[in-house]
Amino acid sequence: TEIIQHTEDDEPSIEASRGLRSDSSLHCSFAEFHPALLLASYIGKLLDVERRRSRSSLSIRRNVYYTGKYWNDIPYVSQEVFHRRATGHPDLHWDLYLLKRRGQPFQNALVLNAGNGWVERALMEKGVIRSGVGVEYLQQFVDDANTEAKAKGYNLTYYQCNVNVDRLPAGNYDLVLNHAAAHHIARLDFVFLQILSLLSPTGWFVSVDYVGPHRNQYPAPLWRKLEQVNAQIPVAFRQRLAYPHLPTMLATDATEAQHSEMIVEAMRRYFFIDLYKPLGGAIAYPLLTHNKAIHSVPYWRSQKTVEMLLEEDRKWLEDDYGRSLFAFIIAMPLDGGVPTKAFQDLLLDAELQREALGPKACYYTRTSVAADGC
């Protein structure tokens, strides 16, 4: 995500540059509040400040999405990670696993940060869901997703929404899907509390996402291992390793993995995790993603290298499942074990105070590799 700072003199206007329509019917509702989410007035004031800031100072360009080549663009990697590691079967993708485990299609799904809607269209095509609602920050993606859904006759509707400040669309959902979305969310408690109120008692909160170190600030042991494994790759296929520079990330992609380490912890506050499958990625993801040399040749030429990297990735994962960068999770609402209203308010207030500090907030342990920031 590319974040561009604006001034009052910028043309076109910020609203126009974001493609937002103040009169659009496809916006998340600000008016519907679940009783469990009502905040004290001082928290509401902080939220209003955050809402104004997010709508007036940032613009996200859509052309940074769906570009570049990632590790899972390689079919063998996708099969290993999102089939075998996720479900235990090389021919069973995680989405069809949901259908098999559930025993019937989900009637109404809510999808976070849905992009252009390709995930939901695949779920509809495979019979995993019967209908769905998607929320997305970029209006152009909202328009594209609605157009594609209508063209295919799918019962899918998309709304423009900044999940950090806007309310999620009201509804009774039996599936909420986080597909590579939550690692872009700043206010996890704010969002997860809403999901808890919207999800049916027997509904599932499913997550397929990055849960590794925030801002890709990898610890020293992992970085040393990456350098060692990269040195074993044929010279023609070696990755150009450069440790993620935090100030640069904050300037060019302020939403990327901002609180990824908090996702599972936050989920556990409101949901019972029924299934947790570590998908790995600590070795294969950094060495295959944006590796132009590997992605630019026929697979038969890079096959041995790709298979070697996945084997090293597997070994690293099996030594300690807690070192997985990605995870497939099925969670369900806690039965009577959610935090009290007072504690919820404290959590939400703490989020607002934390986000108000922006990059000055330092609440992670500084890694021994990352010299700048937290």
Image (spheres, rainbow, N blue to C red):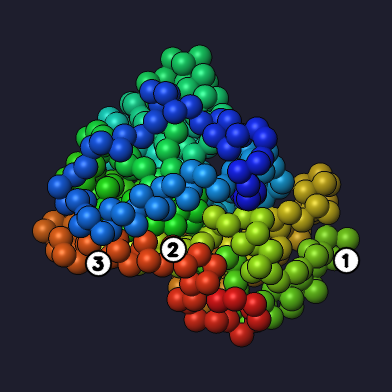
Q: What amino acid type should be assigned to the residue bearing mark 2? A: Ala
Task: Give the secondary structure at mark 2.
Answer: helix
Closer-to-camera residue (335/249): 249
Tell me which residue sits at (33%, 67%) in the image: 350
Provide residue 302's location: percent of width, then percent of height.
79, 54
Examine the image and state in which quarter residue 308 appears: bottom right
- Say the numbered circle drawn on residue 346: 3
- Say the numbered circle drawn on residue 235: 1
Provide residue 277's location: percent of width, then percent of height.
42, 60
Q: What amino acid type should be assigned to the residue bearing mark 1? A: Val
| Left/right of residue 194 with respect to residue 362 in the rendered view | left
| Left/right of residue 320 with respect to residue 46 in the rendered view | right
10 Å neighbourhood of mark 1: few (<14), some, or many (≥20)? few
**Quarter of the C terminus within the rendering:** bottom right
Mark 3 or 2, which is nearer the eye? 2
**What residue occupies the far left of the structure in this picture?**
336
Q: What amino acid type should be assigned to the residue bearing mark 3? A: Leu
Tell me which residue sits at (60%, 72%) in the image: 217
Is residue 330 something that shows in the picture?
A: no
